[in-house]
Image (cartoon, rainbow, N blue to C red):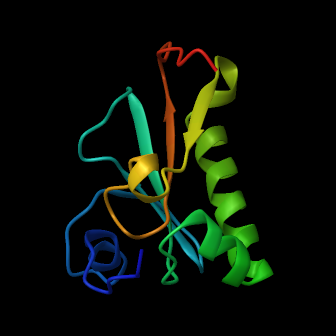
Amino acid sequence: MTYKKDNIFAQIINGTAPSTKVFENKNTIVIKNLYPKAPHHFLVLPKGEYESYTTFGINASEEEKLDLINAINDIIKEYKLDDKGYRLVANTGYFGGQSVPHFHIHILGGEKLPDFGL
C-alpha cells in the first residue's frame, strides 16, 4: 500500500473536506465517524502521512506517538468510555479491511459491541 496524498483523511486534516472534529493536538486530530457502528465512534488520525500502523510505528517521532496515545486517552476520559468499556481498532491493508490508506484508529463505545470470538 502506498500513501495517497489525496485520501479523504488527508483532506480532512488539511481542512479541504468537512468533518466533525472533537479533539486536536499538535500531531493528531479526532473526528466523529460519518457512519458510526456504535453510539460513540471516533476516528483518531495522525496528521503525518502514514498509511498503516506499521509505517506509523516505524517512522513516526516519539512526540507523534505520544500525541496519538494522549488523544485516545482524552477521548476515553471525556466520553467516560472506561466506565463500561470500549474497543480500539486499527484496520491495516486489504485483508485487514482498511478502506482509507491513512493510518487511523477507531474508538467504539457506548453499548455492548459484538463479540468476534477472539
Where residue 36 appears, as percent x and y from the top left, is 30, 36
Where residue 110 appears, as percent x and y from the top left, is 48, 22
- The tally of labels here is 0
In this orientation, which residue lies closer to the viewer: 32 or 105? 105
Residue 98 appears left or right of 55: left
Q: Residue furthest front?
A: 95
Q: Is residue 111 above or below residue 101?
A: above
Residue 13 appears left or right of 77: left
Where residue 81 appears, as percent x and y from the top left, is 61, 29
Q: Quadrant of residue 1?
A: bottom left
Q: Residue furthest right?
A: 62
Residue 88 appears left or right of 18: right
Where residue 77 appears, as percent x and y from the top left, is 66, 40
Q: Is residue 115 above or below residue 17?
A: above
For the point 72% across and 78% down, which residue is it?
58
Q: In which quarter of the image is the C terminus?
A: top right
For the point 49% across and 34% down, which residue is it?
108
Residue 47 appears left or right of 33: right
Q: Is residue 48 visible?
A: yes
Q: Can residue 60 be seen in this view?
A: no
In this orientation, which residue lies closer to the viewer: 56 or 42? 56
Q: Is residue 24 above or below residue 58?
A: above
Q: Quadrant of residue 117?
A: top right
For the point 33% across and 84% down, which residue is it?
14
For the point 72% across and 71% down, which residue is it?
65
In this orientation, which residue lies closer to the viewer: 33 or 80? 33
